[in-house]
Amino acid sequence: MWVHFLVFFLTFFMMEFMAWFTHKYIMHGFLWSLHADHHKKDHDSWFERNDAFFIFYAVVSIVFFLLWQNQILAVGLAIGLGIFTYGLTYFLVHDIFIHQRFKLFRKANNRYAKAVRRAHKMHHKHIGKEHGECFGMLVVPLKYFKS
């Protein structure tokens, strides 16, 4: 049972690297056409083409649930839940806390919350796909913790 907990936590933490990697090399690379509207201030709709990336990770998570359910991969549930939990965390931090797609968590004002907002603000400072910085979400460079 402890192996499943270990796999869950390793998956969750690996997803931060996957988020950084896909954001830097895929979203700001060959799939910029899906991510570009996220860097614009005015949107035609509440939904963004960028939201398609959530669907991709949801499908990956579901595949691991199915592998577990069909007894193909014993730790499939732990991996699927790790991906799902990271996706939920990403949604809460990125879409709700930072971009305020829902008006929640507006008064969070601790050092970590401020650092996350600063780092993401620096990321959005660059309108185009080049010269970006701060591609991760939960791991914030130390320089953003300073006032």
Image (spheres, rainbow, N blue to C red):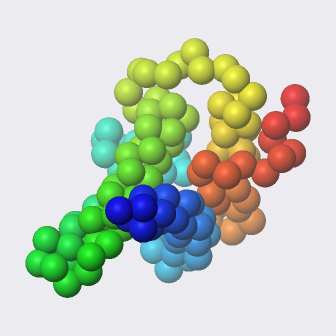
Answer with the quarter of the image where residue 108 lies: top right
Tell me which residue sits at (88%, 34%) in the image: 146
Which quarter of the figure is the N terminus placed in?
Answer: bottom left
Q: In x, y percent, where is residue 25?
A: 58, 76
* Residue lying farthest to the left in this orientation: 70
Tag count: 0
| Above or below, 117 relative to 4 | above
Give me the residue at 42% from left, 67% from top.
Answer: 3
Residue that sits furthest to the front in the current view: 1
Tell me, yes or no, if residue 123 can be seen here: no
Residue 143, quarter of the rendered image: top right
Residue at image coords 74%, 65%: 131
Above/below status of 59 relative to 71: above
* Left or right: 71 in relation to 84: left
Rendered image quadrant of residue 7: bottom left
Percent position (x, y) of residue 67?
A: 20, 77
Q: Nearer the viewer, residue 133 or 47?
A: 133
Q: Position of residue 122 (x, y in %)?
A: 73, 46
- Residue in front for this viewpoint, 118 or 146: 146
Residue sitting at x 59%, y 51%? 137
Q: Is residue 105 left or right of residue 67?
A: right
Is residue 86 something one can see in this rendering? yes
